[in-house]
Image (cartoon, grey):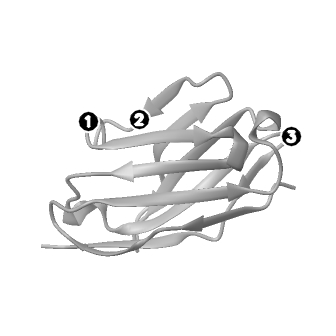
Amino acid sequence: QVQLVESGGGLVQAGGSLRLSCAASESIFSISVMGWYRQAPGKQRELVAHITNGGITNYADSVKGRFTISRDNAKNAVYLQMNSLKPEDTAVYYCSALTTRWDWGQGTQVTVSS
């Protein structure tokens, strides 16, 4: 129901930074929760970060202090700033949104070299 398009992935050395963007097809005021998940080959999808319409954030313990989720209501966008990247952060990162159901973007690849 909600179209989501991620961008900003790429190849980066350990210790570097990337900023992921997620553009939504409708006002994010209509979306109660937006978030980022990631999935590495052969592993289950895991939560990275969530942000509610009220601005409350949640982070996986593995990324606390390194990643920051934010929103821009005027641009209908959510961002994930990733600093101090580690090889274990390598995964496909997916944007998600909750309205009447959970919707997902197509994913963007993040690869961190050692």
Q: Secondary structure at mark 2?
A: strand
Q: Label 2 is placed on what type of residue?
A: Tyr
Foreground disc of the pair 1, 2: 1
Q: Label 3 is placed on what type of residue?
A: Thr
Query: Which residue is the site of mark 1?
Result: 65
Count all numbered tags in the image, as a single digit: 3
From the viewer's side, name the closer residue of 44 and 21: 21
- Whether residue 97 appears in this view of the structure is yes
Binning the other alpha carbons within 10 Å of mark 3 as few (below 14), some (14 to 19) or many (20 upward) gives few
The residue sitting at 56% across, 60% down in the picture is 94
Pinpoint residue 82: horizontal percent, then vertical percent.
33, 52
Asked if residue 34 lies left or right of residue 57, the reply is right
Q: Secondary structure at mark 1?
A: loop
Asked if residue 16 lies left or right of residue 54, the reply is left
Binning the other alpha carbons within 10 Å of mark 1 as few (below 14), some (14 to 19) or many (20 upward) gives few
Q: Quadrant of residue 109?
A: bottom left
Q: Are marks 1 and 2 in contact (CB under 8 Å)?
A: no
From the viewer's side, name the closer residue of 90 and 73: 73
Binning the other alpha carbons within 10 Å of mark 2 as few (below 14), some (14 to 19) or many (20 upward) gives some
Query: Which residue is the site of mark 2?
Result: 59
As drawn, the label of residue 100 is 3
